Image: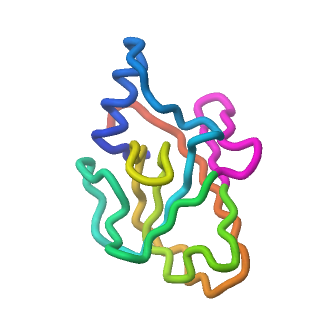
Amino acid sequence: MAITDAMITHIAKTIIGETVTTFAEANAYLGVGDSTTAFAASQTDLQASTNKVRVAMDTGYPKRTNDALKFKATFGDSDANFAWQEWGVFNASSGGTMANRKVESKGTKEGGSWVFEVTLTPTIGS
């Protein structure tokens, strides 16, 4: 999983006991957007200019199994009706820390509810 520079700083702060906003259920979000701009570690938000939405976690998420982190959110009928070309995990409904950003086509949502679940497995080194 490629993480952002902001997430590296977030982890460093956590290690030494500085106050940070966690990625717990109360403040974790999955975001989707329609930008195909390549990932850069310096990015702090999805790159779409207008078509981007963050949705709060479903009850009981995120979850951890060993090193794997699972995030799950349900995008309702009127949420994110556009081509999903990028996604990320956040610790706030706006602003906050973007843990990662992935550029990949997930299809075009045109109404209805979509459940989006991702598993992130952080790794050290390349």
**Magenta-colored stretch includes residue 68:** yes
Rendering coords of residue 121 (x, y %): 53, 40
Q: Which residues are magenta?
A: 57-72
* Quadrant including the N terminus: top left
- The picture quadrant where one finds residue 110 is bottom right
Depth check: 118 or 54 in front? 54
Rendering coords of residue 61 (x, y %): 69, 43
* Quadrant including the C terminus: top left
Relative to 48, is 31 on the left or the right?
right
Judged from this view, the residue extending furthest toward the top is 16
Rendering coords of residue 88 (x, y %): 46, 55
The residue lying at 59 percent from left, 59 percent from top is 55
Relative to 15, is 82 on the left or the right?
right
Depth check: 84 or 17 in front? 17
Judged from this view, the residue extending furthest toward the bottom is 110
- The picture quadrant where one finds residue 68 is top right
Q: What colour scheme has been applied to the protein in the rendered image?
A: rainbow
The residue lying at 48 percent from left, 46 percent from top is 92
